[in-house]
Image (spheres, rainbow, N blue to C red):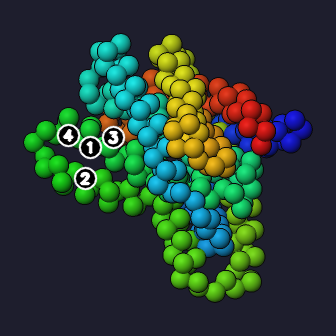
Amino acid sequence: MNSLIYIISSVFGYVIIGFIIKKFINVSEKIYSKFDYLSFNILLPLALITYFWQIEFPRINTVLLLVSFFGSGILVFIIGFQVGNLLFKYKTDDNALLGLSACFGNSVALGIPLMHSLLGISNVMPYMILVLFHGLVHFTYTTIIIESYRNRSLNLSKKILSTITGLFKNIVLVGIFIGIFLNYTKIMQPDMLMNILNSISDIALPCVLLSLGISLAKFNLILSFKKSIIFTFLKNIIHPVIGFIIAKYIFNLEDLLVVTITIASALPSGSQSYYFAYRYNAQKDLISSNIVLSTFVSFFTLSILIILFNI
């Protein structure tokens, strides 16, 4: 129990500190922006390059890992989509954004530090594989749905090509790909360079968590609070339940993969779903409320899962 409290508090503690700093300390927005850029565009990619360069890739059933996780995610997306469509009578593009908010988890800013703390560096590779494909899968079909609805006359192949090109501009994906390339090509790891990179990795994840807390403080929980309860329930409860059932009882995967899929599915709604809402100027209030509420609820739901899995 002491180790559980330490892991949860060490991860969420940085988020809370970042939230408090933003809410109660008068710091210019320019400084926050620079810190955010440093955390996500420099420190985190370097940490990912370092990790993937040094790790020994495990022999796992990658196909069933991906099918279990993304299969459950797509099912939750459909449920969220239909809730918006049938219950709230929203348009197709609005429903796609709500479906994304219900299934897309905070896999980078919160997920990577949490899974490293829970599983250790030797067992976290299956999760990192999910991170690699997370945005690529969910962002692609969400963008296609929205763009197809809003630009019915545009050629579908051009929309798909544009979407994939944009995804590969994601600096997190770039960091992962570079690390994998360095690993598979067996490029030498100079001691001095690795010492520097490992030191950067040690501070990267706390900085990312602080940045996450600062970002959450910008969102308003009160706006669309009642509706956000539904999508938080889908993200924090239904998604991990479906992921667990598929991994455990349909594909009978090994314990590490079941734990990885379930915990990854239980991660709170990711802040990038808000950037989609901002980009398309739709459902910003509801999605921002869902992100804050889902993150708060995840403190308890993730703790319960960790206890149940006896990690």
What's under tag 4, amino acid-wise? Ser
User: Pointers 2 and 1 in contact (CB under 8 A)?
Assistant: yes
Q: Label 2 belongs to which residue?
A: 160
Q: CA distance from mark 4 to mark 3?
A: 10 Å
The residue that appears at 33% across and 32% down in the rendered structure is 96
User: Pointers 1 and 4 in contact (CB under 8 A)?
Assistant: yes
Label 3, residues with CA under 10 Å away: few <14, some 14-19, many ≥20:
many
Dot 4 lies on which element?
A: helix
Q: Label 3 belongs to which residue?
A: 142
Q: Which residue of the protein is positioned furthest toward the right in this rendering?
A: 2
Q: Label 1 belongs to which residue?
A: 144
Q: Is residue 231 left or right of residue 160?
A: right
144 and 237: which is toward the camera: 237
Residue 147 percent across, percent down from the top left: 23, 41
User: Pointers 3 and 1 in contact (CB under 8 A)?
Assistant: yes
Q: Quadrant of the C terminus?
A: top right
The residue that appears at 38% across and 19% down in the rendered structure is 83
Residue 148 disc label: 4
Label 4, residues with CA under 10 Å away: few <14, some 14-19, many ≥20:
some
What's under tag 1, amino acid-wise? Ile
Residue 41 percent across, percent down from the top left: 54, 60
Task: Determine the image quadrant of residue 265.
Answer: top right
Label 2, residues with CA under 10 Å away: few <14, some 14-19, many ≥20:
some
The residue that appears at 18% across and 55% down in the rendered structure is 158
